[in-house]
Image: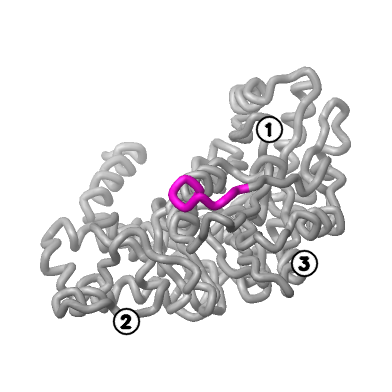
Amino acid sequence: MVNRRAFLRGAAALGAAGLAPRALAAAPPFDPRSWSSVRAQFALDPQLTNLTTFLLASHPRQVRAAIARHARALDRDAKRYLDRQEDMNAADQRVRNAAARYLEASPDEIALTDSTTMGLGLLYGGLRLDEDDEVLTTTHDFYSTHESLRLRALRTGAHVRRIRLYQNARTASVDEIVSAVRRAVTPKTRVLAVTWVHSSTGVKLPIRAIADALRSTRVLLCVDGVHGFGVEAATPQQLGCDFLVSGCHKWLFGPRGTGLIWGRADAWNAVTPTIPTFDGRAFRPWMEGRAPDMPRAAAMTPGGFHTFEHRWALAEAFTFRRRIGRARAATRTHALAQRLKNGLAEVKGVRLVTPQASNLSAGVVCFEVEGRDPFDVVERLYARNRIVASVTPYAARFVRLGPSILNTPAEVDRAVRGIRNLI
């Protein structure tokens, strides 16, 4: 007789070949109201407590299936499959439509990219700036923002200035942050480039309040939204920003290598495309020797051949998240992050960096352990407890955890116990 282990090995081999038995191939129906059902859609290692799923996404079953479907078709006959996508327009439009439904925006306001960094590079690299113009950013922003702006300044002569929004992340307030913005804006300021949720500290900026403070100015509010996108329930319109840039392979759990830029319809004129688009609306004008007449966001979507199986599966990621609900995902993520912060606050020798208040924090929780190097803490948590943590990629280094909708309260408590046992 075939034993159970051999049977499972054989079934796995058949599954890899696309010939899995019907009984094994069938998955339990997805129930978006059940967090255990949400977790069951992911192929995470069950032996680990992974609190870094925001770093580079695990794909839910629906997204994995879509990626595989597109990849099989491309492997079999890429030319004819691309033809069926009508020069890729129809497939890209399907993704933009799904993104627009999730964001409660227009598809014509959305450009597709491969990552947050690509989106920031395209947005900031295309800003219409003169030598006398000033761009404000902050000391809290990540390398991708700082470097994109530095490169744009080299090409235009515009001046980039960095400001500090808060002195202490743990005690930051809305008034302190908004007041710092108001003081920094001058008649020469054309752009404010900020990050919604700081991956260095876990501070979530009050974007709506900042937008209101800029309302009477000519300043474009541009936001790196990657650590809020897929966590927070607010839409770009509710935030009040002019541009929102995000990768879709972090908290949204979309296909790896996908992202977008959302821009307010009348703000897109402030940006010029950098990479030629492959949108079909650009090709005929090129053949006829005239400039294309198309939405600027579509023109901002870079052309060339991409990992189409991932890009086109992004539609399924947005559908998956819409079924769960933005507000419900936000409530769950905040509850788990709050539980983590409350637990860590009671551990002697742990100093929390991230604010306690939910209006100034999201899913990222940063802290330090007295007398311990952050990398050592991360390594010991994994070696002793199989808890996956990370270290902030900045000059000031902290331990970073990010409970998401894939985690449970029990996993959060396990992480707190693991950290307590290190001290």
- The reply to whether the magenta stretch includes residue 186 is no
Q: CA distance from mark 1 to mark 3?
A: 29 Å
Residue at the image point whose x is 72% and y is 30% from the top? 418
- Horizontal placement of 63 versus 213: left or right? left
Q: Position of residue 77 (x, y in %)?
A: 11, 62
Q: Earlier in the sequence, mark 3 or mark 2?
A: 3
Q: Amino acid at mark 1?
A: Val
Q: Residues within 10 Å of mark 2 (few under 14, many from 20)?
A: few
Q: Amino acid at mark 3?
A: Ala
Q: Residues within 10 Å of mark 1 (few under 14, many from 20)?
A: many
Q: Quadrant of residue 423?
A: top right
Q: CA distance from mark 1 to mark 2?
A: 49 Å
Residue at the image point whose x is 24% and y is 70% from the top? 88
Q: Amino acid at mark 2?
A: Asp
- Horizontal placement of 112 versus 350: left or right? left
- Camera-nearest label, 1 or 3: 3
Comparing 122 with 174, the one in front is: 122
Picture disc at residue 399:
1
- SS under mark 2: loop
Q: Quadrant of the N terminus?
A: top left
- Which residue is tagged 3? 209
Residue at the image point whose x is 72% and y is 68% from the top? 214
Q: Position of residue 7 (x, y in %)?
A: 30, 43
Picture disc at residue 383:
none
The span shown in magenta is: 153-160
